[in-house]
Image: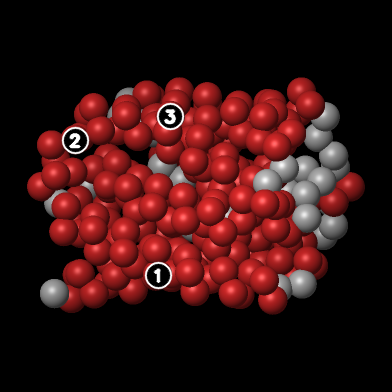
């Protein structure tokens, strides 16, 4: 029962953070579930509550979506996510996690010191950033952090940032989930109680976190993103 309570609480927290930052569900739940399920099964299992929370978040923020960024950055990210999902079972080199962690720390530092606001990606740059963020995320199971790190260089306001990151996450989920289910589908069915608990918790946290986003000033929002990226980067380096 202690394990189920821990998953429920972590899921609520993950959903709330994702409502504010546009990412966090996979970053929080994947390491937790991997303690009991193993990394590969945890990545696949978390994709279900991730989809539930992301779909709900998109419904709440859909009017703020930046369609141009979604077409350029989002579709490239989905393609990269599919490639990463195909590779994630073969790529286990800890060096990949080091690179991932350092990229997140670099993005966090750039935002904290104002460098990210001076960079504006061209159309080609947005395509490249989307594809690379999706590829890295698909391989290590943490799409959202590296995606948000890349999106800090895009000219997006708070609600548009979260809405577009959320829509991109839906595209990535659509690309990667069939791959995960093809390799671990029967094993996911065996752990359905934990998946259900996580999904319900994420939905509850998403509803609660929406109110926090509405009250958060623009500057504080970007700083919150930077802090979350730094924490995720430190975790990736420590867990290599």
For disc 3, the neighbor class at 10 Å (few under 14, some 14 to 19, many from 20) is many
Q: Nearer the viewer, residue 36 or 83?
A: 83
Q: Which residue is mark 3?
A: 175
The spot of residue 214 in percent (x, y) is 67, 71
Task: Please give the name of the residue rendered at 27% of the width and 47% of the height, measured from the top-left corner.
Answer: 45
Task: Please give the name of the residue rendered at 89% of the width and 47% of the height, measured from the top-left corner.
Answer: 118
Helix, strand or loop status at disc 3: helix
Q: Is residue 214 above or below residue 89?
A: below
Q: Which residue is mark 2?
A: 185
**2 and 1 marks in contact (CB < 8 Å):** no
* Cα distance in 3D space between marks 2 and 1: 26 Å
**Residue 204 — which label?**
1
Query: Earlier along the polypeptide chain: callout 3 or callout 2?
Result: 3
* Cα distance in 3D space between marks 3 and 2: 15 Å
Helix, strand or loop status at disc 2: helix
**Left or right: residue 30 compared with residue 212:** left
């Amino acid at each position: 029962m202690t394990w189920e309570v821990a998953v429920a609480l972590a899921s609520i927290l993950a959903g709330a953070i994702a409502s504010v930052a546009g990412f966090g569900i996979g970053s929080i739940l994947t390491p937790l579930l991997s303690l009991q399920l193993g990394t590969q099964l945890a990545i696949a299992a978390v994709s279900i509550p991730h989809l539930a929370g992301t779909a709900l978040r998109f419904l709440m923020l859909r009017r703020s979506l930046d369609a141009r960024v979604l077409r350029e950055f989002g579709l490239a990210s989905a393609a990269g996510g599919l490639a990463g999902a195909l590779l994630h079972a073969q790529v286990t080199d800890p060096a990949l996690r080091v690179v991932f962690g350092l990229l997140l720390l670099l993005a966090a530092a750039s935002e904290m010191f104002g460098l990210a606001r001076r960079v504006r990606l061209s159309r080609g740059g947005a395509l490249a950033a989307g594809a690379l963020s999706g590829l890295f995320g698909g391989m290590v199971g943490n799409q959202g952090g590296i995606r948000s790190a890349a999106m800090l260089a895009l000219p997006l306001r708070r609600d548009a940032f979260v809405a577009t990151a959320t829509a991109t996450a839906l595209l990535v989920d659509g690309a990667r989930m069939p791959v995960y289910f093809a390799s671990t589908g029967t094993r996911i069915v065996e752990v359905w109680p934990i998946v259900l608990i996580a999904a319900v918790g994420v939905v509850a946290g998403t509803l609660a976190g929406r109110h926090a986003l509405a009250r958060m000033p623009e500057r504080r929002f970007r700083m919150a993103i930077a802090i979350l990226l730094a924490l995720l980067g430190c975790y990736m380096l420590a867990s290599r």
